[in-house]
């Protein structure tokens, strides 16, 4: 048998592999083994030293043409499905041009920290979208890429932007990975979700779907059929991971009712502390639940009325231990740093107890009388703070009013509201008009120094009394000689939440005032610039609303005015309300 030589194992002469090998080794060490056509033209002579490299390049050119000519055509790719039809009416032309301007604006385009007198167009986009959605308009196809880019950069825009973009946004998101957030935000990734009327499909998706699909399914079913969602969750509850159980359990907040109590009682014995705490919180929001009754019994044992000192006084005897029953019902035994254990346990007990348990325990008094009672041994702040949390959790406006107190009170928020965050939560339980009146009274008495967070829970556009209070307070702040950026948060809110009809109240404030000795240098001109921006923004909002409503309402809008969602209370440049009617 002949042994194959290295020459026999080498690639055939003139093949692509042979040419590559020659190029790597060099034509001096390995001359080309295949002759190539003479590329020299008439009268041209290739130097002897260049003959081999030129021959190699010529052979490579010939082989390249041969390889390309020998390619077999691939199967044609399937054509893309057409984008779905959007049946909603098109925007009026002026509104479409306005949308393009809003989407073209980019934060910080002017550079530096000074905003100047020009309005922040990007911050007006949320209210423009809210109004367009309420009127039932479809997004212009050419605006969809910029709209998706804007929503990708700002999560607060996503719900309104995706609602406005409609099904075409999901079609585009499947083609561009940068827009995949739209598929995650849509229930079922943009596909229709099965409901209780399709039990087999619903069960298959619940048992085999991705986590995001399962969350979307549970949320969708819960919003329409609360009992069906609870039963679906129960089928796999024991096999779920702790972090998934926590997420799924949180979905029961929607449509929470007494029928959920047996399932939540089982969750109190969960091996995860976070799951137990969430189940206890949900049960405490059901005043008639067995857990609420147990908590009320424990809390009443700690709080009593003492009449031996003349005037009735609340006395407190906080728990001396956190027993297993308390821990099972959601009481966290370990207190945070800086908190006493007994005060920590007491606060949790009172927070989880139904508020209607206290009048009978404290001499038949109503919330205002109870809050007005003195509390012995410095327990007042702890007890009132727990009542604040209970009132916010149970959405009890009567207790909220009592704990807030009068807005003009010297303590700036009532006997029970120990922080701005608690006052904001209590205000959230009141109806929008009452909320606005309280905040207006607070600003009239205490100014704007603590008003930003309270204004954030007021419905936009602001009611007339609240708007007047804010404008008056800004005028007072200007006269005091401070700089306007000390109130930048309130100014940003005012630009978005004041009624456009309030623009005329700034006419006398746009002139640069004479500076007093106590004024900060240049403050007057800065205030004039800020008020000019305010007026420009308010008039722009009025123009936006007129452009959107010029051609009448779209589908589903009827004759009702556009609803006004509440502004986002997050800090920063300030949330946007909705476009306002005038």
Image: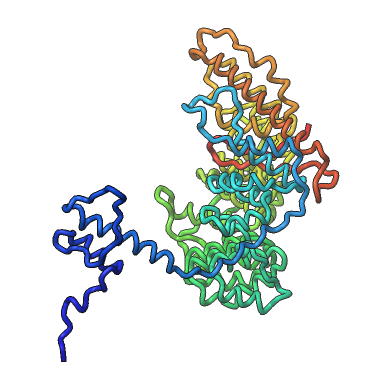
Q: Pick whichever, 439 or 523, lies toward us.
A: 523
In the image: residue 143, left or right of residue 564: left
Task: Specify the quadrant that holds the N terminus.
Answer: bottom left
Q: In the figure, residue 402 lies in which quadrant?
A: top right
Counting labels gives 0
| Residue 252 in sight here | no
Q: Residue furthest bottom?
A: 1
Q: In the figure, residue 373 lies in which quadrant?
A: top right
In the image: residue 297, left or right of residue 44: right
**Residue positioned 17% across, 64% down in the render:** 30
Q: In the figure, residue 172 lies in which quadrant?
A: bottom right
Q: Position of residue 293 (x, y in %)?
A: 63, 64
Q: Residue furthest right?
A: 559
**Residue positioned 64% across, 41% down in the render:** 126
Q: Pick whichever, 393 or 181, lies toward us.
A: 181
Q: Position of residue 187 (x, y in %)?
A: 63, 62
**Residue positioned 25% across, 58% down in the render:** 55
In the image: residue 318, left or right of residue 495: left
Indicate how the structure is coloured in the image: rainbow
Q: Position of residue 453 (x, y in %)?
A: 58, 37
Residue 523 sits above or below residue 321 on the image: above
Residue 198 sits above or below residue 399 on the image: below
In the image: residue 148, left or right of residue 54: right
Task: Specify the quadrant that holds the C terminus.
Answer: top right
Q: Position of residue 57 (x, y in %)?
A: 28, 57
| Residue 109 in sight here | yes
Residue 424 sits above or below residue 350 on the image: above
């Amino acid at each position: 048998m002949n042994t194959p030589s290295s020459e026999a194992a080498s690639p055939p002469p003139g093949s692509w592999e042979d040419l590559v090998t020659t190029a790597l080794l060099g034509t001096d060490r390995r001359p080309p083994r295949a002759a190539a056509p003479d590329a020299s033209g008439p009268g041209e002579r290739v130097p002897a030293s260049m003959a081999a490299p030129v021959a190699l390049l010529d052979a490579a050119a010939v082989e390249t043409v041969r390889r390309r000519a020998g390619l077999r055509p691939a199967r044609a790719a399937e054509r893309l499905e057409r984008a779905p039809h959007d049946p909603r009416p098109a925007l009026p032309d002026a509104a479409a041009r306005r949308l393009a301007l809003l989407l073209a604006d980019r934060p910080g385009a002017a550079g530096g920290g000074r905003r100047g007198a020009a309005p922040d167009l990007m911050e007006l986009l949320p209210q423009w979208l809210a109004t367009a959605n309420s009127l039932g308009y479809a997004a212009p196809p050419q605006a969809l890429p910029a709209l998706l880019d804007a929503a990708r950069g700002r999560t607060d825009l996503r719900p309104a932007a995706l609602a406005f973009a409609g099904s075409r946004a999901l079609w585009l998101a499947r083609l561009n990975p940068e827009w995949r957030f739209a598929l995650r935000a849509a229930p079922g990734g943009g596909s229709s979700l099965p409901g209780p009327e399709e039990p087999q499909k619903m069960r298959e998706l619940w048992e085999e779907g991705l986590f995001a699909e399962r969350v979307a399914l549970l949320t969708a079913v819960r919003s329409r059929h609360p009992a069906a969602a609870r039963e679906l969750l129960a089928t796999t509850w024991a096999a779920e991971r702790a972090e998934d159980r926590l997420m799924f359990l949180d979905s029961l907040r929607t449509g929470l009712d007494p029928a959920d109590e047996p399932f939540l009682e089982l969750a109190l014995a969960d091996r995860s502390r976070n799951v137990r705490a969430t189940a206890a919180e949900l049960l405490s929001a059901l005043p008639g639940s067995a857990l609420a009754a147990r908590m009320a019994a424990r809390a009443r044992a700690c709080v009593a009325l003492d009449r031996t000192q003349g005037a009735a006084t609340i006395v407190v005897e906080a728990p001396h231990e956190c027993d297993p029953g308390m821990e099972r019902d959601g009481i966290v035994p370990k207190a945070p740093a800086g908190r006493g254990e007994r005060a920590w346990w007491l606060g949790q007990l009172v927070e989880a107890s139904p508020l209607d348990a206290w009048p009978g325990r404290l001499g038949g008094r109503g919330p205002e009388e109870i809050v007005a009672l003195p509390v012995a041994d410095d327990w007042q702040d702890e007890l009132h703070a727990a009542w604040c949390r209970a009132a916010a959790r149970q959405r009890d406006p009567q207790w909220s009013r009592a704990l807030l107190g009068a807005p003009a009170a010297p303590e700036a928020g009532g006997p029970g509201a120990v922080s701005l965050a608690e006052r904001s939560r209590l205000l959230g339980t009141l109806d929008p008009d009452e909320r606005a009146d309280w905040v207006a009274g607070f600003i009239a008495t205490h100014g704007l120094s603590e008003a930003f967070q309270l204004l954030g829970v007021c419905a936009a556009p602001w009611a007339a009394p609240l708007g007047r209070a804010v404008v008056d307070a800004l005028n007072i702040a200007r006269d005091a000689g401070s700089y306007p950026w000390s109130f930048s948060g309130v100014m940003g809110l005012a630009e978005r939440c004041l009624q456009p009809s309030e623009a005329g109240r700034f006419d006398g404030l746009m002139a640069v005032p004479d500076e007093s000795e106590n004024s900060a240098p240049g403050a007057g001109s800065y205030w004039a610039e800020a008020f000019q921006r305010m007026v420009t923004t308010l008039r722009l909002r009025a123009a936006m609303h007129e452009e959107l409503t010029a051609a009448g309402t779209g589908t589903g809008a009827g004759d009702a005015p556009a609803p006004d969602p509440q502004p986002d209370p997050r800090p920063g440049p300030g949330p946007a309300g909705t476009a306002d009617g005038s």
